[in-house]
Amino acid sequence: MSRFIAAAIGSVAALAFTVCTANASGPTVRDTPSNSWTGLYVGATVGSAEESATWTAGAVITPSADDRGAIFGATIGYNYQMAPWLVVGVEGDWSKLQSTTGPIPACGGPCSTETNWLATIRARAGVLLGPSALIYATGGFAWADVDNSVTIASVSDRATGWAVGAGVEVRLDKHWSLKAEYLRVELDDTLACSPAVCGAANFATDHSLQIVRGGVNFKF
């Protein structure tokens, strides 16, 4: 997982360096009212998600299991340029995941956790590196649809939690922009096997996701 996080930071840093170098030789978008960052936008994202889950049954806690898979989705948001150097806004997204943690033999199962989809709504605040590039931090609420499976049962549940991250967005013209983003998502426990089915083995999971993704946005 540490290599995954390092790759995420490296990707964002590389894009930031490229943007700064480009802006040093001249902005790609003129700083005029018509090219303000203020406005509604929609977009699409694709990337990689690493999911980690830990199962518990009473006082018994299993080792965590990790898996990595693709993530892709859609975004809608609104930016407001408060100053020549400051942009704030709100962004919501919905993503489909293709990853399943496990199997985890220590459950007596094996056990597995699969996040079917993930949605977030987050605040964004960033600093402009010239008129065409934004480096930002983001954070807010997350929720997901989760399937937990053990040999004798499978349970679908909704998990809530939080998401924080950072990214770089580069404007190509007054409508189109590209971005690279890292998000960490922490989800609350979800029911894995009810007492009625598993008796004393009432499993729950506590899991997180590390997401690295790129995206394209269109501002209206």
Image (spheres, helix red, strand yellow):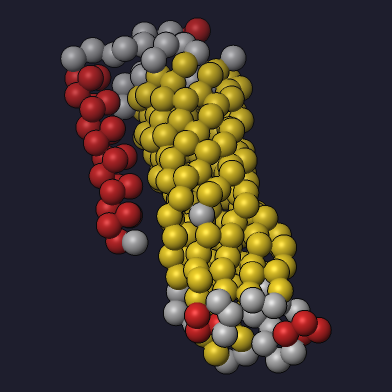
Q: Quadrant of residue 85?
A: top left
> Quick one: 216 or 77, which is closer to the camera?
216
Q: Percent x, y for residue 184? A: 46, 54
- Left/right of residue 189 with respect to residue 217 in the rendered view: right
> Looking at the image, how many numbered discs can be counted on the residues?
0
Above or below, 73 against 194 in this view is above
Q: Percent x, y for residue 189? A: 63, 71
- Left/right of residue 6 with respect to residue 106 in the rendered view: left
Kindly identify the residue that appears in the image at 55 percent across and 90 percent down.
Answer: 60
Quadrant placement of the C terminus: top right
- Left/right of residue 57 with respect to residue 7 in the rendered view: right
Above or below, 163 against 175 in this view is below
Kindly identify the residue that appears in the image at 33 percent across and 54 percent down.
Answer: 5
Above or below, 197 against 26 in this view is below
Q: Percent x, y for residue 113? A: 58, 65
Q: Quadrant of residue 212?
A: top left
